[in-house]
Each structure stands twice: as C-alpha cells, then as structure tokens.
Amino acid sequence: MNIISIIPARMASTRFPGKSLAKIQGLSMVGHVYFRSKMAELLNGVYVATPDKEISDYIKSIGGNSIMTKFTHRSAPDRTAEAMAKIEKRFKKKIDIVVMVQGDEPMVRPEMIDETVKPMIEDKSIQISNLGAPITNRQEHNDSNVVKVVVDKNNFALYFSREPIPSFKKGAREVPMLKQTGIIAFRRDFLIKFNNMPPTPLELIESVDMLRLLENGFKVKMIFSDYPLFSVDTKEDLGFVEKKMAKDDLIKSYL
C-alpha cells in the first residue's frame, strides 16, 4: 500500500502565531514533527503542507519535502487533501492512506503513526482512525483547548467535545478521561468525501471537525497509545513541552 504522512502547518495560528517555527530543544517545532514522522515504518513518504514560504523554505533547509498550499483553507483536512492531490500528480501514483499529523504535535512518535494505520490495513471497512491518549489530570480535562472523546466498547467514537466529558458532576469518583490528538489516518477517497461534506451543527458548536462524520452516520475508530502526547496551542504549552522533551530518547537521532 502507498501510505504517506502529510503535516499541515501554518504561521497564522490564532492562539500562537508563528508557533510552527517556535524552537523546542534548539529545533523548530515542525522540524521535530517531520523528523519523528519519518521514522514510522509503515510510511512511504512524509510531506509538510503549508501556505507559508517561511515554513516551506525551512523544511527544504533540513532536507524535507514541502508542498505549497492555498492560504484560504479553513481546516487541516482541506489543506491535507490539496497536498495529497499535488503529490499524486507529481509522482503519478495514487495514495491509499494519508496520515495527517498536525504540525503542533512535537512529541509524536513513529510508533503512534504505525499504531494509527495498522487497523486500516487489517480491516478494510475502517475508513478513518484517530489516535487518542489518556487525560492525566482534571485540569487537562477542563481545558477547552483539549478535545475530549468518549468511545464505545469497540473503541469507536461516540462523541467529541471541548467540554469535560464524561461528567464528574453526578458524583463519580473516576471517569474515563480520553482526548483526541492531531494524528488522523484517512483512506484517500474518504478524505475527499469528508471534505465535500458541508459542516454540521454539532461540528460548528464544538469546533471539532470529526463530529461532521458522526453526524452523518460514519464511524471514527479510536486508537489509544501508551506514549504521552501534548499538543502546543499556547506559549505556555511550548514551555511545558520543552521541559518534557529535555530527556527525549528520539531527539539524539535527528539533532
């Protein structure tokens, strides 16, 4: 199978402008994502999709593959789909699965990408899989920047929210606290189908694009990794991740 990863990245982040090129342990954040994604065994290629020449030039300077995309995209899947079409045109080869790895996931590990893809290789009925992770504390559970997810007994998503779900308000001492991450694998045609669907009411209310699929009756397979993963949405997150990655065992292989 032809399986690639596309990393959407841009400078115009609402909460943290320019974060893609912010330094973590001496290397730009998107550089960490690129090098770490390249280590995944199941990938045939890794590309950064960006509308910004600064990011494109940086990726080229570290020997990476950059695909220029439009400024007008409103979502990461839209940008990923445009880049996928350009890659197919360049290499004249159809892609089977594309793994979208957000450019603000500097702690991504190659094992996470492989874990996300494997269910789709093993079960052709799965059109999309999304890596999730445990939430480790109530503060993170209450953070609106963190997208929470609840799943059924087969680990298919039941609902996504920026609110703390399940709720502690009825007196439960423990609830399964899980979050969505920025690693999502799409089958090629399903990514195109997803982007052709109009936004849905709950998607707009929660600002979570995966709800578009649930509202249209599609299943989203959730995969949960044992490795910790922290997205960078703010400058405070950057400082937290900088400390977390101080003893990271992968960095020495690419720095």
Image (spheres, rainbow, N blue to C red):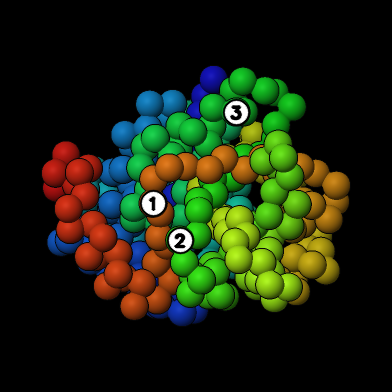
Q: Which mark is residue 49?
A: none
Q: Which numbered disc, 2 or 1, marks the residue closer to the eye?
A: 2
Disc 2 + disc 1, Cβ < 8 Å: yes
Name the quadrant containing residue 76: bottom right
Look at mark 2 in the image and give the residue it sits on: 136
> Of marks 2 and 1, which one's residue comes earlier in the chain?
2
Q: Which amino acid, mark 1?
A: Pro
Which residue is found at the position 58% from the left and 32% from the top? 97
Q: Residues within 10 Å of mark 2 (few under 14, many from 20)?
A: few
Report how far apart the C-alphas of labels 3 and 1 lie in the structure: 20 Å
Contact (CB < 8 A) between labels 3 and 1? no
Percent position (x, y) of residue 110? 36, 37
What amino acid type is highlighted by mark number 3?
Pro
For label 3, the SS is helix
Of the two numbered discs 3 and 2 in the rendering, the one whose residue sits closer to the viewer? 2
Work out whether mark 3 precedes mark 2 in sequence or the reverse, and give the earlier one: 3
Query: Which residue is denoted by mark 1 in the rendering?
Result: 228
Q: To which quarter of the image does residue 104 belong?
A: bottom left
* 174 with respect to 228 (left or right): right
Would residue 159 appear left or right of 178 to someone viewing this image?
right
* Residue matched to label 3: 119
Residue 14 spot, x, y in % from top left? 49, 79
As helix, strand or loop, the secondary structure at mark 1 comes to: loop
